Image (tube, rainbow, N blue to C red):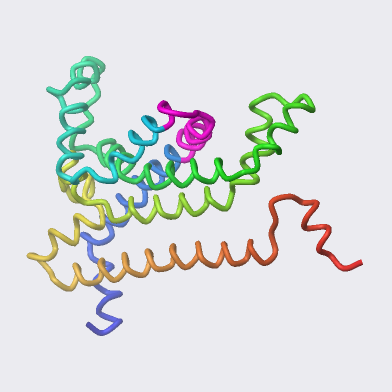
Amino acid sequence: MPPGDLVSALGTNAATDALRVTAETITVSMLAILVVGTPAAYWISTRRGALRDALVTLVELPLVLPPAVAGIGLLVAFGRAGLLGGTFDALGVDIAFTKVAVVLAVTFVASPFYLRTAIWAFEVVDPTLPAAARTLGARPGRVFARVMLPLSRGGLGAGAALAFARGLGEFGATIMFAGSLQGVTQTLSLAIYEQLDLDIDVALAVSALLILTSALVLLSVKLMSRWRSGFGSLTPFAATARRPT
């Protein structure tokens, strides 16, 4: 397709609706992953032995589950006739086949990419640094915010980028749990699947957009890592020591 036709196809209702739904849902999902996942990853990184292994296994489980299994699991848990569906139904809240379902599906499949990377980022920090902070009287929350987060920001950023890229392309769990309703639950990946039979030009245009976005995300991670390795440091003292006198 000529580039002009690709751009024009992105202006169709199907493409713009899918772009809006994707932007809304992945934004909420990433906020949930970062806000909940960061302290959770730090807590897991401080565990030892069999407990840590069990927790990491639970974190990694969505990585190996078939998407259909993840989708049916979410439906059984949060659907109207599911394990928790009756509770939400009594509150007048319907989750399945809504944008909330898209957010849950994206969060479920994308969060392990952030959590696993974040756990590793916290674990590779020199343990003497947080220990020294605690010795100087810093409370656990202050150690986490002022010591561990700054020292782990490179790994946390890489994990967030991977989770974003994975959530952007989520398909299987979403279509099982949220359906593919244009303007409601149809994300960019679901729009490609539907437009493959309706308008191949739109499917190609959305595919090109996803390829470009994914490539930019991965490239930004590499550039950030290179920039940090060349100009950053684990501690401000090391950065000061490298400056010429």
Q: How many marks?
A: 0
- Asked if the stretch drawn in magenta spans residue 40, the answer is yes
Q: Which residue is rendered at x = 39% and y = 33% of the image?
A: 53
- Asked if the stretch drawn in magenta spans residue 130, the answer is no
x and y percentages locating residue 74 in the rendered image = 21, 33
Q: Residue furthest bottom?
A: 2
Quadrant into which the C terminus falls: bottom right
Q: Residue furthest right?
A: 245
Quadrant into which the N terminus falls: bottom left
Q: Residue 164 vs residue 8: left or right? A: right
Nearer to us in this view, 108 or 236:
236
Q: Quadrant of residue 146?
A: top right
The secondary structure that most of the magenta stretch takes on is: helix
Q: Residue 1 vs residue 163: left or right? A: left
Nearer to us in this view, 56 or 207:
56
Nearer to us in this view, 201 or 127:
127
x and y percentages locating residue 122 in the rendered image = 56, 41
Q: Residue furthest front?
A: 49
Nearer to us in this view, 98 or 53:
53
x and y percentages locating residue 6 in the rendered image = 26, 76
Q: Which residue is rendered at x = 48% and y = 36% of the image?
A: 41
Q: Which residue is rendered at x = 53% and y = 34% of the image?
A: 42
Q: Which residues are magenta?
A: 34-52
Q: Which residue is rendered at x = 43% and y = 30% of the image?
A: 52
Q: Residue 175 vs residue 168: left or right? A: left
Q: Residue 238 vs residue 211: left or right? A: right
